[in-house]
Image (cartoon, rainbow, N blue to C red):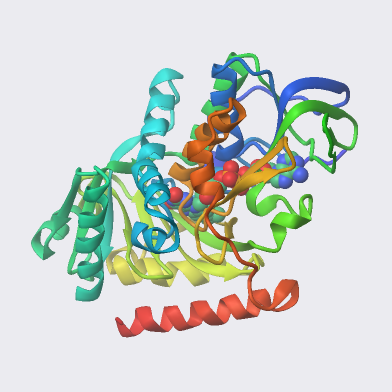
Amino acid sequence: MANTPYPQSYYAASANAVPPRPVLQDDVETDVCVIGAGYTGLSSALFLLENGFRVTVLEAAKVGFGASGRNGGQIVNSYSRDIDVIERSVGPKQAQLLGEMAFEGGRIIRERVAKYQIQCDLKDGGVFAALNSKHMGHLESQKRLWERYGHTQLELLDERRIREVVACDNYVGGLLDMSGGHIHPLNLALGEAAAVESLGGTIYEQSAALRIERGANPVVHTAEGKVRAKFIIVAGNAYLGNLMPELAAKSMPCGTQVITTAPLGDELAKTLLPQDYCVEDCNYLLDYYRLTSDKRLIFGGGVVYGARDPANIEAIIRPKMLKAFPQLKDVKIDYAWTGNFLLTLSRLPQVGRLGDNIYYSQGCSGHGVTYTHLAGKVLAEALRGQAERFDAFADLPHYPFPGGQLLRTPFAALGAWYYGLRDKLGF
Ligand SMILES: Cc1cc2nc3c(=O)[nH]c(=O)nc-3n(C[C@H](O)[C@H](O)[C@H](O)COP(=O)(O)OP(=O)(O)OC[C@H]3O[C@@H](n4cnc5c(N)ncnc54)[C@H](O)[C@@H]3O)c2cc1C
């Protein structure tokens, strides 16, 4: 029997203790079979259980094995594409609904943490840092745009103010979102899984969905068992493989890498990020970082199209960290790991239904900690027959990557190289 462990990350090393979970070795019947125990699957399961559904979750490895247990831990609101782009590609009613929902995921996380007493080092405050005046102009227009949808908590930071929150000379200003923030992502997932079980849901680990028998009463097959369900929610995201071939053409797994320093000590940590906010810069290929509760710096950046694992992650990410914080040149890196997110061509989530009873949400393209929590709520609403918000996502247009399965990776990498060059030249 396969037993896939967590990757060696800071999060796995500092995870809260959890009980062992069973492998599915039976035929079970349920209302909803959720495939994947990342945030999308767990959030869906929780909202469904809270609304009286019976839920069975199948996880190929362990809870939070995918991006949800490996990410930068940054609670970044809105989507991976700006609302003005959404406004241009959909009608005003749909744009209004999507704009209103842009900050809901962060609220859901906080509600979950409070309601289920999840220990995940939640901190408020996230900064978007501008490296040049073009970035700053973009943040100013973002603030105005978000305010049109009622999100008025954002504060522009000038060059003096951003120095008070980030000890990095590279920024000309920024935007502070106190409804953003950061968490220990794996502990959030583990806490949500415990909440699912506290409401009577069942989670099977090391139980990959290998085949779905579609139809009026769909059946999900694993190596040693099967789940008969009224509905299926597909939440495998970048780790889904080819289980649903019709979803794979319009999305592409991509890797991104994270390093974690040795503990810095309170004093040094406080000089870097005095308010303990998380930070991401405004480049297309962006850097993101924050402190952990034991005062390490977690620093992420870079994208590997096609999700190949780089041989030496530290060699890729450490120079980026030192560009932001040269004062860390003698600090040891204790952990380095990679994880996969799912990119769509529009960088907007891919949401929908196959037949009458198979629902999916995937492809949030980089920023997914908040969106996936919202997705769970929106999917649960759809299963309860309230599909207005689900439809607002499902109606977003999606296109296959140019080049097909064979050439999409080099084509996307070429596009990213172009944007990376623009970042470097400050365009
Ligand atoms: C390194 C990294 C850093 C990131 N940093 C941030 C950040 O700071 N802020 C932010 O907003 N976003 C960030 N993201 C993105 C964010 O983490 C993801 O968008 C989000 O976690 C996706 O959640 P998910 O549940 O959809 O997918 P995942 O968390 O990937 O979960 C999918 C799960 O499905 C399981 N699965 C797949 N196929 C099957 C199957 N056939 N049967 C059963 N189980 C299956 C997998 O094992 C996995 O556990 C980052 C992503 C990465 C990789």
Query: Residue at 19% of width from left, 53% of height from top?
Result: 165
The answer to whether residue 168 shows anywhere in this view is: yes
- Residue 173 position, x and y percent, is 17, 64
In front: 416, or 344?
Answer: 344
Q: Quadrant of the N terminus?
A: top right
* The furthest residue to the right: 224
Q: How many badges with numbers are in the image?
A: 0
Give the side of residue 204 with respect to residue 224, left or right: left
Q: Percent from the top left, x then y, of residue 180?
A: 31, 44
Measured along the vertical axis of the image, is residue 13 above or below residue 320? above
For residue 288, side relative to residue 197 (left or right) = left
Residue at point 32% right, 85% down?
425
Q: Position of residue 119 (x, y in %)?
A: 43, 27
Q: Is any atom of residue 167 visible in this view? A: no
Q: Is residue 49 above or below residue 413?
A: above
Residue 408 vs 205, above or below: the answer is below
Write the residue at 32% across / 43% down: 181
Residue at the (76%, 21%) spot, across then down:
30
Above or below for 118 versus 128: above
Picture quarter with the C terminus: bottom left
In percent of width and height, residue 217 lies at 83, 29
Question: For residue 55, which quarter of the picture?
Answer: top right
Q: Nearer the viewer, residue 290 or 378?
A: 378
Lateral position of residue 252 relative to residue 107, left or right: right
Specify the quadrant of the image occupied by residue 83.
bottom left
Drawn side of residue 202 relative to residue 92, left or right: right
List the single residue furthest toward the left.
160
